[in-house]
Image (tube, coloured by chain):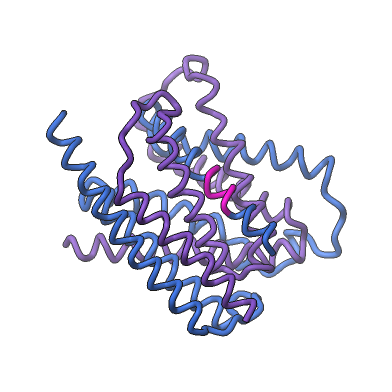
Amino acid sequence: MRIIVILLVVFAGMGLSFEAGLLGPLGHQVGHLWATLSIFGVGAALLWLISIFTSTGKNQDMRSIPKWQLTGGLLGPIYVVVLTLATPVLGVAMTMIGVLVGQVGKSFAIDYFGWFGTSKQPVDSLRVTGMLFVIAALVLTYLGVQS
Amino acid sequence: MMLFMLLAVISGMALSSQAAINGQLGAKVGVIRSSLLTFSVGTVVTLLLIFFFEPSYEANLLTVPKWQLMGALFGIVYMVVMVAAVPKVGVAIATVATVFGQMVMSLVIDTQGWLGNAPIELNYWRLASMICIACALICIYLSNKQQEKYNVSTS
């Protein structure tokens, strides 16, 4: 059972690369922002449909949600636009590794400096080592293109 | 090329901030509704940018082959799978499985030139970089595992 769940997550991760692979050529044909809209427009429409059918009655008043928690919607398009711009130049793998560097580095920084109201945590040497490995991977793919 | 690498790193930072923010929102209104809010705001912002900054192209979203519009589906499937899987297998394994899937598929897409991408040869540099990713995954897995143990013992 557990292995099936793990395999599902692996497939879901493959889907993320597929998404990135679709975006580059699409952005080239119709424009990077239109390609981004295909993600958010289709995504919002689908989620709206899903939310109708899965409504749990946990209907919280929109006004009680802190406004800064909606800024996630501003950050998402940054990621998608960059995918459409970067994949044709870097390829899917290098783009994904670059994104990974940003993710690992950012989560390390959040813990280390105590941003977003999280409590400061001592340096986690495993996490630093992991980050160094990811950076090394990025450098290696870069060298691979140069050679 | 350096510029695009930098952009990719920055977008990864944006992605992890978004995940942190959405996590807080999701706890309050549920995962589907929080994603719907995020995607709605994203749609409106993208539309505004298109109105003012997008030059016109020959093709548009309605003329390209329909399979090119499937990107959003993969993102939503990923989200749903993660919501279902994380309570069962934990964050540590889920993270490693995600990145593993991402790397395998991106290598295949690059090497085969799928989906209309220019093919990129699989050379030793790329293989070496995948070994580094594997090492990084081991570190991330162990570190997440420690944190999970810590969270269980303190809660």
Where the N terminus of chain A falls, by quadrant? bottom left
User: As drawn, is B147 to the left or to the right of A89?
Assistant: left
Where the C terminus of chain A falls, by quadrant? bottom right
Residue at (69% x, 37% y) in the render: B45
Q: Position of residue B34 (x, y in %)?
A: 46, 34
The answer to whether residue A140 shows anywhere in this view is yes
Q: Position of residue B41 (x, y in %)?
A: 61, 34
Residue range corresponding to the magenta coloring: B9-14
> Which SS type dominates the magenta stretch?
helix
Residue at (20% x, 65% y) in the render: A3
* Chain in purple (letter): A
Report if residue A144 lies within the magenta region.
Answer: no
User: As drawn, is B123 to the left or to the right of A88?
Assistant: left
| Number of numbered tags placed on the structure image | 0
Residue at far top of view? A64
- Image hue for chain B: blue
The answer to whether residue A38 shows anywhere in this view is no
Residue at (25% x, 60% y) in the render: A5
Say which of A15 and B150 sits in front.
B150
In the image, residue A76 sits, relative to residue A36, either above or below, namely: above
In the image, residue B27 sits, relative to residue B60, either above or below, namely: above
Q: Position of residue B134 (x, y in %)?
A: 35, 67
Q: Position of residue B7 (x, y in %)?
A: 64, 52
